[in-house]
Amino acid sequence: MQPPPQPQGAMATGAAILTVPCSVGRRPKRSSQRRGSGSASLSVRASSDANTVTLLDYGAGNVRSVRNAIRHLGFGIRDVRSPEDILAADRLVFPGVGAFGSAMDVLNSTGMADALREYVQMDRPFLGICLGLQLLFDSSEENGPVSGLGVIPGVVRRFDSSKGLIVPHIGWNALEITKDTQLLQGADGHHVYFVHSYHALPSDANRDWISSICNYGDSFVSSISMGNIQAVQFHPEKSGDTGLSILKNFLSANSSGAKVPARRKASKLAKRVIACLDVRSNDNGDLVVTKGDQYDVRDHTSSKEVRNLGKPVDLASQYYIDGADEVSFLNITGFRDFPLGDLPMLEVLRCASEKVFVPLTVGGGIRDFTDANGRYYSSLEVASEYFRSGADKISIGSDAVYAAEAFLQTGVKTGKSSLEQISRVYGNQAVVVSIDPRRVYVNSPEDVPFKTVKVSSKGPSGEEYAWYQCTVSGGRDSRPIGAYELAKAVEELGAGEILLNCIDCDGQGCGFDIDLVKMVSDAVTIPVIASSGAGAVEHFSEVFEKTNASAALAAGIFHRKEVPILAVKEHLVDAGVEVRV
């Protein structure tokens, strides 16, 4: 397995923070656009060692979110450039992302593995996040066994999906605190955000290390604490106010963070409510949030203008404040010709990640391409730029359809598709496949070679069955593959989550397509996000009660303020559905 791409342009702040205020406006002409140009003012603030934390970023996934959270709390960052930087650190944060083996390859080849062991053995302040916890253990079974740092006895294993458990474990779950630590003060009763397929097993040998466990099928280690050594399996930088409080507990030695009142005690994995923002340039060249009616984003008036429902960063920030569990950006016109040249959309991500401390997903144009000068770019390079700009997950649409079709025809995993490349390097939990199907009614399941369902409402000619034909290019072109077949194939190819849309329901406000969501969520063992059709709070409880959907996504009803996110959450609580409130 190749090591993850190294970050480009990562800023070593040392004893100062360079702050560039975000400004996302009109899409400039590509020929003259330069990142960072213009008259944005710069402010420099000195940072003493007491306000500086050392960050180990080895280049995998979205570490920008951790940087933003640390800076949001008023601390500077000193980047690790060598093993000596680790040993010189006063406080070290290690936000591991991606595959266990790839991370150990990088750490061993750079000499940082030995430096980390020595730093931990000296009992210096250390916070590992996600993979940064797993790597402390003896070994992992991920593409292995692979030896870890060997600080904590125990093995990291994959969640068992053979008994119906949805893997990866994605979402907001509850902690069972087993040890009184400063790090977790104020976290009791709250949900925190997890996204992982592998977990550390508790045992008698590591019992003294464990400060909390979480239950997902079985109990696993969700945090450890021994002296000054702390690590968490969840992502505090993506766990809202609760997560920021946990980070502050580590960064401020004499602080217990800001106690966040728990309105309802967390008890298990919560269903997620996701706000989606379709972003494109309008006819004046400005980036706007829009919303389609069966994928048509232009007003049904004489002007035929692109519907403008607000500015992307402003809306994303508001949805975070309102309680959205995730925010999803879909760049619906982006990267058609030159993906890495779409700087305004990348700037939207960068600015949003400075204000939004829940997961950010972005999709649109993630594929291999060759630019006008003949230079080839892989989908992995495109995705890497998204991750560096602040995305936690990327969403692949049309390219995943073509990859699935090829796989179903040959039965061979080439490893060359965007889906396979990105999941191999960043882990399948970082890859969402977006499916855009259209309902096709038939009289009998024998009429087509695709999976059909008996529909709740008959077709226009009294048909009792339907299959769901997948489309590409924003719903414009139909393909000879069904949603069921596509979902099964992309799970096999490495998808970690499915965003399940429905063209027929899009913008109609009549509810999710329950027949479709149930068919797909019953067929796969990865999380399914129900999308398209929400028009009332009852539609959310319906999809959670009647299907195995892990999350429900909406756009227009939130943008137009017809249904507030808080109203959805309160309704779900009343309906007995576990949510993060």
Image (cartoon, helix red, strand yellow):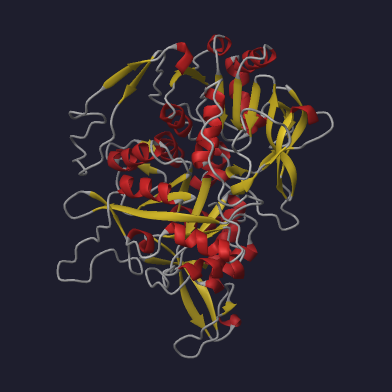
For the point 71% across and 47% down, which residue is it?
215
Q: Is residue 24 left or right of residue 92?
A: left
Q: Is residue 307 left or right of residue 462?
A: left
Examine the rendered structure and indicate whether residue 214 appears above or below residue 452.
above
For the point 40% across and 15% down, which residue is it?
47
Examine the rendered structure and indicate whether residue 371 appears above or below residue 225.
below
Observer-nearest residue: 294 or 110?
294
Which quadrant: the N terminus? top right
Residue 455 position by quadrant: bottom right
Picture coordinates of residue 300, whole percent (x, y): 22, 71
Observer-nearest residue: 196 or 172?
172
Q: Is residue 567 left or right of residue 332?
A: right
For the point 61% across and 54% down, which residue is it?
526
- Residue 148 visible within the image: no
Picture coordinates of residue 568, whole percent (x, y): 48, 62
- Residue 413 visible within the image: yes
Picture coordinates of residue 387, whole percent (x, y): 44, 37
